[in-house]
Image (spheres, grey):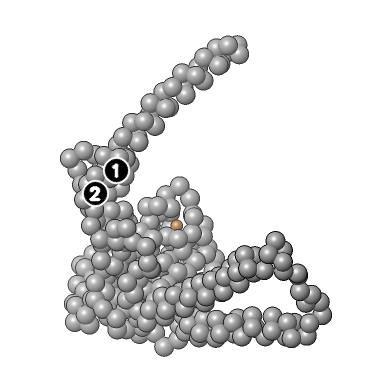
Amino acid sequence: MMNPENTLRSLTQLARRRSGAWLGWFAAWISTCAYAVNDLPGGPAVNQLNLPRPATRIAEEQIWLHWFMMGICVVIFVAVFGVMFYSILKHRKSVGHKAANFHESTAVEIAWTIVPFVIVIGMALPATKVLVAQKDTTGADLTSKATGVPWKWGSAYLKGEGEGIAFVSTLDTAQRQMSDNGGAKAGETAPDDYLLKVDHPLVVPVNKKIRIITTASDVIHAFAVPAFGIKQDAIPGFVRDTWFRAERVGDFYGQCQELCGKEHAYMPIHVKVVSAQDYSAWVALKTAEKAAAKPL
Ligand SMILES: [Cu+2]
């Protein structure tokens, strides 16, 4: 058995080794920061502060709601603190003011009931309108099921053009290796779609209502694409759904957004929005691939 002195010594050694590792890690991190990183259209941008550029009406409405609510909060903040600081400075006791007595003032009671009520209704009405639209998954042109599995996303086209197509989408192996090795090393550059590139993106047609049914095989995951304004938990044993209608072609990225386990960071979502013709061509290709793979 180890005596306490030996234990202490080995702990100190371990701490020393660890701090060396931390310093090395910190230096590596600083050096990767020096590389040029570019915006990823449909994904995160460099120094992005605002919400991503919307690709659906719902995402557009969410951004409007965000700034609308923010505006109301700022007005309330400025008004409340303005009155407070004005009162503290101009009506202080040292300049001869006496405190007014508002006890049982009906006018004040009515004002502080009506004003917040009006504000809450003014916020709830537009928010409810968007929320109801978000939840309305009826009348979809295409339905696809997204299944969260450790640590990938399974896609199965259930209804609409492309019915029967199914695949599993996995993070690009080269990017995964780069991450396992501690990120981009000196002389290497992490691609703009770092940890967002997958082998099989979810291909959908533009301007069509796409319904995504979510479920999971193990733990709770979440299917989310910020540019579409969607985020839906994928729960084992349950079926939930969400929808989007992308208004422009392009690549859009998301990630699992429910902390699901050790490889939560490695299950990105890539949605490829293409024109109707390109979508039909992709469906034909996938169908041919499936037919070729079938045993005779
Ligand atoms: Cu997950």
Image quadrant assignment for residue 274: bottom left
Q: Do the residues labelled 1 and 2 touch (CB within 8 Å)?
A: yes
Q: Position of residue 8 (x, y in %)?
A: 55, 16
Badge number at residue 183: 1
Q: Which amino acid does label 2 sit on?
A: Ala
> Toward the viewer: 192 or 288?
192
Residue at left offset 23%, top offset 57%: 38
Image quadrant assignment for residue 213: bottom left
How far is the residue under mark 1 from the one under mark 2? 7 Å
**Residue 115 in view in this figure:** yes
Q: What residue type is labelled 1?
A: Gly
Q: Position of residue 186 (x, y in %)?
A: 21, 38
Disc 2: CA contacts within 10 A as few (<14), some (14-19) or many (>=20)? some
Q: Position of residue 85 (x, y in %)?
A: 60, 66
Relative to residue 184, is residue 115 drawn left or right? right
Residue at left offset 27%, top offset 49%: 175
Relative to residue 66, is residue 105 drawn left or right? right
